[in-house]
Amino acid sequence: MPTEKVTGSATLSLSFESLQSAKAAYGALLAEADFSHRGGSKVLLEGKTVRVEIKADDPVSLRASINSYLRLMQIIKTVETDTE
């Protein structure tokens, strides 16, 4: 009996007060975008919002990618708050 392959996806969004902050975050997150044999991610800039679309071939890889991006987003927001 064939085993069904489990895949997944997630979208994370981060909004900013200024376009300048959104562009800076976009650049930082874009540098982390990856495409591998286990999935990949895409970073998009939509006005003052940065969106990260993550696709993964397995739950472990999806969780790892989500955690990585959430850590980076937390750092970005902390830096933005501290520089205001």
Image (cartoon, rainbow, N blue to C red):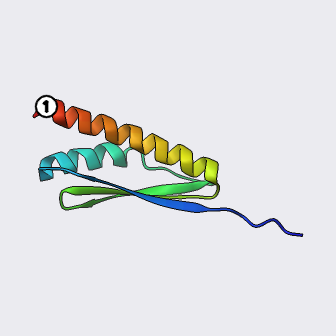
Secondary element at tag 1:
helix
Identified at 19% across, 37% down, the residue is 80
Relative to residue 63, is residue 42 drawn left or right? Answer: left
Q: How many labels, in total? A: 1
Residue 31, given in percent of the width and then of the height, sits at 37, 44
Residue 24, given in percent of the width and then of the height, sits at 22, 44
Relative to residue 38, is residue 28 drawn left or right? Answer: left
Q: Residue furthest top?
A: 82
Residue 47: quadrant of the picture: bottom left
Q: Which residue is mark 1?
A: 83
Type of residue at label 1?
Thr
Residue 60, given in percent of the width and then of the height, sits at 63, 47
Q: Residue furthest right?
A: 1
Instruction: Rate crowding at label 1 as few (under 14), some (14 to 19) or many (20 or more) other CA atoms within 10 Å.
Output: few
28 lies above or below 44: above
21 lies above or below 81: below
Identified at 25% across, 39% down, the residue is 77
Residue 13: quadrant of the picture: bottom left
60 lies above or below 5: above
Q: Residue furthest bottom?
A: 1
Identified at 76% across, 67% down, the residue is 4
Q: Nearer the viewer, residue 22 or 36?
A: 22
Q: Nearer the viewer, residue 41 or 63?
A: 63
Identified at 31% across, 42% down, the residue is 28
Residue 19, given in percent of the width and then of the height, sits at 13, 53
Quarter that holds the C terminus: top left
